[in-house]
Amino acid sequence: MEVILIEDVEKLGRKGDVVKVAEGFGRNFLVPKKFAIQVTPSNLRQVEEAKKKIAKRLAKELDDAKRQAALIGEVSATFERKVSDKGQLYGSVTTQDIADLLKAKGFEIDKKRIRLDEPIRQIGEHPVQIKVHPEVMAELRVSVVQTEQAAS
């Protein structure tokens, strides 16, 4: 029996795929659970139209992500932190700090999309990768500078 998957099914296929399955599996499980529909010319046409719309939407999302990545690359990200005599930061710059700075500059980036192997604990300039889209990474230059000490 051939069916068109209308949901992703593990170890079988992705949404929109036409797969051949056992008669009982298709009739008793996939179709009643709304994971698939039977192959008919009408259903095939509908799936193809849906795939075209999805492809168009994904292409637009990719273009938007590329534009956003370019804008993020132009952002100036400077953090002031207290520094010990040995040049170590008291505290660190974390993904949450970077996400908050980006939010203040108009970007909605979840901190989970910011790639830091470990929090930044040194003064200087650090490249930070941000996953804007599954296929697009942006690079943000983060500068950590010493807080100006008040004269005693």
Image (cartoon, rainbow, N blue to C red):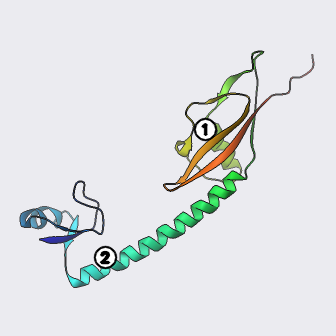
Q: Residue furthest left?
A: 24
Residue 152 image-quadrant placement: top right
Residue at figure coordinates x 58%, y 47% from the top left: 130
Q: What residue is shown with label 2?
A: 47
Q: Residue at the far right: name it.
A: 151
Q: Residues within 10 Å of mark 1 (few under 14, many from 20)?
A: some
Question: Residue drawn 19% across and 62% down?
Answer: 33
127 or 150, which is in the foreground?
Answer: 127
Looking at numbered disc 1 in the image, what kind of residue is underneath it? Gln
Q: Residue at x 29, y 62 (%)?
A: 14
List x then y, in percent, for residue 83: 76, 22
**What residue is pinned by disc 1?**
96
Image check: 130 left or right of 26?
Answer: right
- Relative vertical location of residue 141 with respect to residue 108 in this rendering, above or below: above
Q: Mark 2 near mark 1, Cβ–Cβ under 8 Å? A: no
Q: Which numbered disc covers residue 115? A: none
Which quadrant: the N terminus?
bottom left
Image location of residue 110, percent across then percent down: 55, 47
Local SS, label 2: helix
| Disc with the residue nearer the chain's start (2 vs 1) | 2
Residue drawn at point x = 17 percent, y = 63 percent: 30
- Left or right, 137 with respect to 54, comes to right
Nearest to the eye among marks 2 and 1: give it: 2
